Image (cartoon, rainbow, N blue to C red):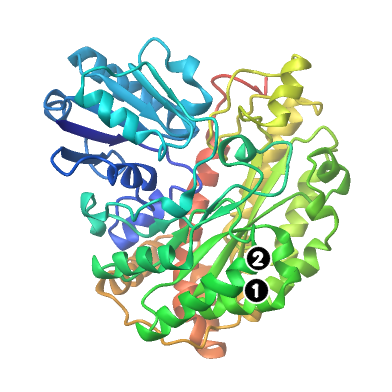
């Protein structure tokens, strides 16, 4: 049996880092973890090939030579998925589709996808494989109950060319205990967090080490700290021991909720484990909008103090922010800018409020006849599938101005200096500087320091870090490169015109 696994391409988004990847000669930020995990269930006698379209072209011959094409995607990959499926249809190759996009939107692909895997795939694979072998594949494979991820195997890394990626990814848990109105995680992963064992995590980390990986690893959990006691008791001590015995070959980053700031022991253990970045859904400094979003965990915290405390433990706080809540007034754009700027949130992803399928917000707005189709999944395309309460033109123009201001070089580098001034440099062994890192620095001198719009700010931050805080020099270079990507995304956004959905006109 010949199986072609296809991961559709991403548009150039905030998190794609496409403008930054050229500095480190990489093709994609992260690998397709879902497909790599599902691949481990396929019989070893099957011929399995993976094509990540973010790294390589999908060839017609690859499709024609396959017995089945397995495709997995997220919402932001919808358009690329449609193109892949059409090609498969044209060549008469059956498509098996799974993952978040197809689980939430099977109706979108009803006429083009042959077989659907809806829900988490682990408990479905045995039946699917048996039916493929017996040539009795069913139209739908549905698993409404969440699987036991303590039984999920190590991903099949040998399907990848590791050199193409800037970071690897693994998963420790699924689900989130919170119930934010605009979030679909409850529908996809559940409200009761499920975790892998410490042994599983060490096995996965070791497998990447054995494969030759030596850079960063992203824990893709929607809320890594959903079960703090298990982390502190089992997982983090095991990670610390492993990192020490291998001289800290990896740095880790993940997503957490704001209550991370409440637990000094947890922050210290995560820092000792090698975590240096956390993404936090801050959303807005407006309490009324937080109440509207059912984001009560944020209302209970002083957001500024929480951010500053997390930063003081050696973490970069990457923030998610939203404008377009019903409670938002036209003053929200300045409030958001001031909050982000004053708290040194260097990487601030700001998007218009959208309602994904599976969220409470989607159902509420559908009942109010305020939905404009489906969301694109691109956080910074100035599009929303919601009819807002704020005047549409004011919302879109205010949003575009906010993103433009945030990634104006002067403002961006001011935030960067604010953060680096308080950043606590980890005391674990530093890995050797790689050839790609040296190359990235040299490219940054050429593209940013000589020809870039940010050249003045670029040299100021490098000079400051070199003489005032030399241990953060490499961080300063990395952030300068990220800043270039964010600036290009912001410039593209400012020039964009709405093709559908919310319009400025």
Tag 2 residue: 228
Marks 1 & 2, CB-CB < 8 Å contact: yes
Say whether residue 338 is left or right of residue 222: right
Report the quarter where the N terminus lies.
Answer: top left
Q: Residues within 10 Å of mark 1 (few under 14, many from 20)?
A: some
Q: Residue 207's spot in the image, x, y percent?
A: 30, 65
Q: Which of the pair 340/311 is nearer the observer?
A: 311
Q: Which mark is drawn over residue 266?
A: 1
Mark sitting earlier along the chain (1/2): 2
Q: Which of the pair 492/272 is nearer the observer?
A: 272
Q: Secondary structure at mark 2?
A: helix
Residue at left 33%, top 16%?
114
Vertical order, 355 against 349 (above or below): above
Q: Residue furthest top?
A: 111
Q: Which of the pair 151/406 is nearer the observer?
A: 151
Q: Residue 190's spot in the image, x, y percent?
A: 62, 41
Q: Secondary structure at mark 1?
A: helix
Residue at left 72%, top 72%?
263
- How far apart marks 1 and 2 lie (CA) works out to 7 Å
Whether residue 315 is visible, yes or no, is no
Vertical order, 138 against 130 (above or below): above
Vertical order, 250 against 139 (above or below): below
Q: Residue 163's spot in the image, x, y percent?
A: 24, 59
Say whether residue 304 is left or right of residue 423: right
């Amino acid at each position: 049996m010949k199986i072609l696994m296809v991961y559709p391409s991403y548009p150039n988004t905030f998190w794609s880092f496409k403008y930054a990847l050229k500095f480190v000669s990489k093709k994609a930020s992260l690998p397709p973890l879902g497909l790599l995990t599902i691949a481990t269930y396929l019989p070893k006698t099957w011929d399995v090939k993976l094509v990540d379209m973010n790294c390589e072209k999908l060839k017609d011959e690859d499709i024609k030579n396959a017995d089945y094409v397995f495709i997995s995607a997220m919402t932001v990959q919808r358009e690329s998925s449609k193109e892949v499926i059409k090609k498969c249809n044209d060549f008469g190759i059956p498509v098996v589709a799974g993952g978040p996009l197809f689980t939430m939107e099977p109706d979108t692909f009803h006429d083009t996808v042959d077989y659907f895997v809806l829900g988490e795939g682990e408990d479905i694979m045995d039946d699917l494989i048996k039916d493929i072998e017996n040539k009795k594949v069913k139209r739908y494979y549905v698993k409404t109950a969440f699987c036991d991820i303590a039984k999920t195997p190590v991903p099949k890394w040998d399907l990848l060319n590791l050199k193409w990626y800037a970071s690897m990814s693994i998963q420790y848990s699924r689900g989130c205990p919170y119930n934010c109105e605009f979030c679909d995680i409850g529908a996809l992963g559940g409200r009761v967090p499920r975790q892998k064992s410490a042994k599983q995590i060490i096995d996965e980390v070791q497998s990447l080490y054995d494969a030759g990986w030596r850079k960063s690893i992203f824990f893709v959990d929607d809320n890594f700290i959903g079960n703090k006691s298990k982390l502190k008791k089992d997982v983090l001590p095991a990670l610390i021991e492993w990192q020490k015995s291998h001289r800290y070959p990896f740095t880790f980053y993940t997503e957490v909720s704001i209550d991370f700031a409440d637990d000094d022991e947890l922050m210290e253990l995560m820092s000792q484990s090698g975590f240096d970045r956390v993404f936090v859904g801050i959303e807005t400094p407006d309490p009324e909008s937080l109440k509207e979003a059912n984001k009560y965990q944020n209302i209970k915290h002083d957001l500024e103090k929480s951010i500053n405390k997390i930063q003081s433990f050696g973490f970069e706080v990457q923030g998610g922010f939203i404008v377009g809540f019903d409670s938002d007034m036209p003053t929200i754009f300045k409030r958001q800018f001031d909050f982000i700027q004053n708290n040194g949130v260097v990487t601030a992803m700001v998007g218009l409020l959208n309602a994904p399928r599976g969220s409470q917000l989607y159902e509420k707005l559908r009942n109010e006849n305020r939905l404009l189709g489906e969301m694109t999944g691109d956080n910074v395309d100035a599009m929303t599938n919601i009819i807002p309460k704020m005047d549409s033109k004011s919302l879109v123009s205010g949003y575009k101005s906010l993103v433009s201001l945030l990634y104006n070089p002067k403002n961006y580098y001011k935030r960067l200096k604010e953060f680096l001034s308080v950043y606590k440099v980890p005391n674990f062994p530093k890995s050797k500087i790689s050839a790609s890192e040296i190359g990235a620095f040299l490219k940054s001198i050429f593209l940013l320091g000589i020809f870039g719009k940010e050249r003045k700010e670029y040299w100021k931050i490098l000079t400051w870090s070199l003489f005032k805080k030399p241990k953060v020099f490499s961080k300063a270079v990395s952030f300068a490169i990220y800043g270039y990507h964010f600036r290009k995304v912001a410039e593209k956004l400012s020039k964009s015109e709405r093709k559908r959905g919310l319009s400025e006109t």
